[in-house]
Image: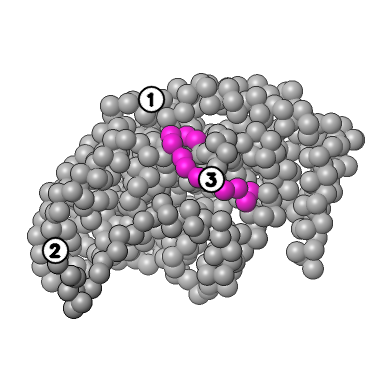
Amino acid sequence: MPADPTVPTVHRLDLAALLAERGAERYELHSKYLNPQLPRMLRTIGFDKYYERAEGPYFYDAEGHEYLDMLAGFGIFALGRHHPVVRDAVQQVMDLDLPDLTRFDCPTLPGLLAEQLLSFAPGLDRVFFGNSGTEAVETALKFARYATGRQRVLYCDHAFHGLTTGSLSVNGENGFRKGFDPLLPDTAIPLGDLDALARELKKGDVAALIVEPIQGKGVQATPPGWLLAAQQLLHDHKALLICDEVQTGIGRTGDFFAYQHEDGVLPDLVCAAKALSGGYVPIGATLGKSWIFEKVYSSMDRVLVHSASFGSNAQAMAAGLATLRVMQDEQVVENARKVGDLFREQLAALVDRYELLAEVRGRGLMIGIEFGRPRSLKLRTGWAALQTARKGLFAQMVVVPLLQRHRILTQVSGDHLEVIKLIPPLIITEREVDRFMAAFTDVMDDAHKGSGLMWDFGRTLVKQAVAGNR
């Protein structure tokens, strides 16, 4: 029977064929249509690799070479890539043809995920689901200001809480803030400084302090006892404690939330995201005490005073439920603690061996490796040249051969920092630790020669940094 010309033909989208046909254009497409500086940066530092697929803690290129992922998509892929339980849950929810996001019902999956998530956070009662970490922070800022009737939020120097306007207002890195002023009326204090916190609280206009229990930039933890003391000070002044656990939460530090490492700490609001997605569907979650939610949603007139168009969507809820199931069934949090302790111990043992290695710190599988000024004259000359051009270039000199020579993906932990941050999937084992240690010692041995390809690359970085400052 001939096709009816009045009925449009629907063609199946063959993604595999499309990627095969256009995949080689990926950098050109980004240069033309997206952020033009991303491909430029990747090519400059030699990170312009073509990864074809991924599984668990590994990437694979077209030749089948295996790359160890020590970034986990900045913490998103806590379970590695394409965990079968999460993939199955997302597929199931699509096959169910649920009447998602009707706006006028109370679907089951958000309630179940909230129930499960709160079971890991005793003392917190309710959850708001959004779509990202920065949305979780925005929610916490709004709720804190409304619940207290105050406007000002304190944050810590070098903090990172997101890049939308509200979360940018509590971002402690000026490089992200520059050019986007004016922002909200918020104030920075030094991390761990109780006196500075007390001075600001005495002004009587502070709604909350937002803090990462371990800062992503530089992997700096709050000093022992500081969170508990800060919490008491805040509550004495009728202000709230917000813990941003977007990167540290969901098992990263060897506790389900990093604030739980310190007895007695119970934030008023907690922000989570990244790992809760299982690596499949974006999700953000703001956990909080009932009285805060009840004050914000105080009447039927205010039922939609804070909402998110895609918040609580079925695919995200299914991915979150599956992620929490895997966390429990596979003892992922315990693995992060055990393997993280082993990893840090082995790295810390190298500090006395390498004069360019200053400190190893962190908790669980959130590890910072900091480099510092060497003692020997031979190495000090090269170090000084790098520091004069731009702080952070030596760490970049280490990151590049880890990828190019050893196929291990890492990152420098922030602009102008001599720190490499390791935030691998929480499912890694001693096998991955051994592989990294072998690669890292090889790179450090090379760096301590004071000459060779690494230092040739360092001179290239110096030239580029000097040119960029003109």
In the image, 105 versus 306, the foreground residue is 105
Give coordinates of residue 315: x percent, y percent.
Answer: 25, 51
The reply to whether residue 191 is visible in this rendering is yes
Task: Measure the C-alpha gap from mark 2 to mark 3.
Answer: 38 Å
In the image, is 432 to the left or to the right of 416? left
Magenta region: which residues?
47-58
17 vs 89, nearest the viewer: 17
- The residue that label 1 is drawn on is 334
Q: Are marks 2 and 1 in contact (CB under 8 Å)?
A: no
Per the model, the C-alpha gap separating discs 2 and 1 is 39 Å
Give the quadrant of the N terminus.
bottom left
**Disc nearest the viewer among 2 and 3:** 3
Sequence-first tag of 1 and 3: 3
The answer to whether mark 2 and mark 3 are in CB contact below 8 A is: no
- Residue 259 falls left or right of residue 222: left
Write down the quadrant of residue 43 in the picture: bottom right
Q: Earlier in the sequence, mark 2 or mark 3?
A: 3
Count of all numbered marks drawn on residues in the image: 3
Q: Which of these two is toward me, 181 or 31?
A: 31
Q: Residues within 10 Å of mark 3 (few under 14, many from 20)?
A: some
Instruction: Write the residue at 66% across / 37% down.
Output: 402
Q: Nearer the viewer, mark 1 or mark 3?
A: 3
Q: Residues within 10 Å of mark 2 (few under 14, many from 20)?
A: few
Q: Give the SS element for disc 3.
A: strand
Q: Which residue corresponds to mark 3?
A: 51
Disc 2 is placed on an element classified as loop
